[in-house]
Amino acid sequence: MTPLTGYLLLSAMIFSVGLAGALSRRNAILVLIGIELMLNAANLNFIAFWRYGPNPAALTGIMFTIFSIGIAAAEAAVGLGIILAVYRHTKNTDLDQMNSMKG
Amino acid sequence: MSIIFLILAAITITGASAAMGLRNLIHCVLALTLGFVGLAMLYLELGAQFVGFTQILVYVGAVAILSVFAIMMTRSAGPDAEAEAALSASWISGLVVAGATFAVLAWAIITSNITAAASAQPEVSVKDIGNALMHNYAVPLEIMGLLLTAALIGAVIVAMPQEKAP
Amino acid sequence: MTPQTVDQIFVITKAWIMGHVPGAAQPIASAILSVAPVLAVFPLLFAITTVLERKGLGRMQNRYGPNRVGPYGFLQPMADGIKSLTKEDIIPRSADAVVHFLAPILLVLASFLAYAVLPIGRNMVIADLNAGVLFFFAIGSMVELAVFMAGWSSRSKYSLLGAMRAVAQMISYEIPLVLSAIVIIMAAGTLSTVAIVNMQAVYTHGLPHWFLFTPWGFCGFILFMIAATAESNRSPFDLPEGESEIIAGYYIEYSGFKFALFFLGEYLGMFATSGLAITLFLGGWSAPFSFLTWIPSYIWFFLKLLAFIAAFIWVRGTFPRLRMDQLMGLAWKFMLPMTLLNVFDVGIWHLMPHGILRWIVCTALLVIPALLLGRALTRKQKLQVRTYRYAD
């Protein structure tokens, strides 16, 4: 088992854990945290391929990861803002009960 | 597979699983922070210094604190919050889907023919990253700036308490 | 003993010891030998600073400081240490025990980690990282999480309020802190602290090339020090921990050794940020004049650090505390535009030809907006006649 396979398996594991949490938890904030975990798993994938890939001098993996970290931070900020706005409206962060668009 | 990789992988998986499994939300976020630090150390092990430190600065220093603030402000962390059910009504299907995803991914990884030779650690300095950002990736950089500005303004507007009409 | 030997005495000692270490244990022995002096010296400096601060503040307030224990009170830290070690460790019943235990540990860990990239002397740095300054700021952002953990885990209204205030203050001031350091990174072209100090350790006509002696460097230095004072929750920004405001803020429910650990963490953070300011702006271990280079480099670093500590104590004894909204207004409305203007300024400095004109242009570009902005921000606050309303 090459080191690259190890990193890819770890990345797949983190992705599945994030996916499981995002699909099974009730609180909206935890779903967002699950999405952050999935993004992080993808970043690990990028860096692992950059390190063990054919052309590390092109810095493609690192560039993708830097942009991904920035975008994930922006998405977390906006997502949590939306959750706060919905909470202020319905006094509830339970996703099972947010099933109507009529406010 | 080196021992350092196994230890860091164990730390990361523990943090990620605890983040998704614990009942108290603040404990979830703290476990998530442990997972992020584990990932940052994995990046350092892979030789991407800049990305590892950026991961700590952005995720541990900003996203985790933001999540904690959101948990505080939506009252999801008090004593009455722990009495509610933690899992959604359809949690079994969620776990099944996640398990199936992992099975498919792992099968694809293990059966693929990755001929990754153990190459030397690529020496990348921050200057190279800066050069790449300014020359090859200048347009994505500017778009990121626009996106971050839009996200900043949007998050403030969305989360602002609305004035009650008199 | 030539001056070079005295200057490199620690490096020579370490090399001599490493010669006697077997090959397999070389990396770990090298790491231990580099880290142990930092672990020994800076807590000692913390102990000295506590008594210096109490005596300094006392003299500024026209009273003696502690003067019972030892000559002129200088063994007071020993008494404090024994007291805090023997006090009972109280954990509130409703507190979250695991997080309550981990918060001071994380704080001290983050504060110690930051010393890894500070060059204490010539060739004396623990880790010469390529992205040294970024490492420092990344570790500094872990302190906020520790503060929040401390405040939340105590399950007490005062500590949660203090923690929220402290975290809001720290994240607000992190932006001017990083932006004022970016000016130096732009001018030096590198993120490595060792390279930045080496760039400043050259002399022309006996004067050094410190970044402090440039308009953008001076402005960046002032902004960096204000932001550093706010980041360490130090007066006049110590609303989250002010004794007359909120008792002790986020570490009320801590007693005994954990309280001492919080103090240690806060002061170590202060020393680390001062160390970074010395590295970025004041030339690190280099002497201020070229005829003084015979004094060892580490002596210069600690002299500059002591000057910073004295300045911190002086500011604490002088200025009144800022209210929360004044504090946030200062960060977002004054310091953020000034740091952005500073970044613009260093670009102009770099592109203009050498000469007196660029000094004048760059200085004017910083001073005039600062005056105008300050005037605009304080204009609305007319002082009114104080009226009292009493409850009937």
Image (cartoon, rainbow, N blue to C red):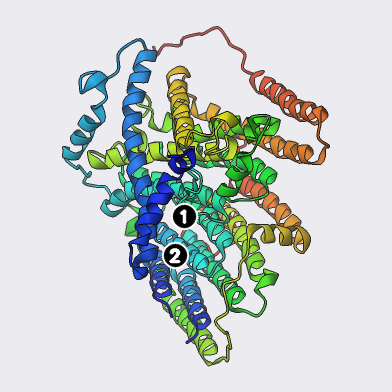
Which residue lies at the image location 55% right of the left edge and 54% below the top edge? B58
Amino acid type at image mark 1:
Asn
The secondary structure type at the circle numbered 1 is loop
Q: Which of the pair B157/B102 is nearer the observer?
A: B102
x and y percentages locating residue C266 in the rendered image: 39, 38
Q: Which of the pair A73/B97 is nearer the observer?
A: A73
Q: Which residue is mark 1?
A: A92
x and y percentages locating residue C96 in the rendered image: 28, 51
Pointer 1 with pointer 2, Cβ within 8 A: no
- Do dots 1 and 2 share one subunit? no
State the residue lying farthest toward the top. Answer: C385
Q: Which mark is residue A26?
A: none
Chain letter of disc 2 in the image = B
Instruction: Report crowding for label 2: few under 14, some 14 to 19, many 20 or more residues within 10 A (C-alpha).
Output: many
How far is the residue under mark 1 from the one under mark 2?
A: 33 Å
Can you say whether C240 is above or below A103 in the image? Answer: above
Q: Quadrant of residue B121?
A: bottom right
Instruction: Report crowding for label 1: few under 14, some 14 to 19, many 20 or more residues within 10 A (C-alpha).
Output: some
Amino acid type at image mark 2:
Gly
Q: Is residue C89 left or right of residue C362?
A: left
Chain letter of disc 1 in the image = A
Q: Which mark is residue B38?
A: 2
The secondary structure type at the circle numbered 2 is helix
Which residue lies at the image location 36% right of the left edge and 38% below the top edge? C250
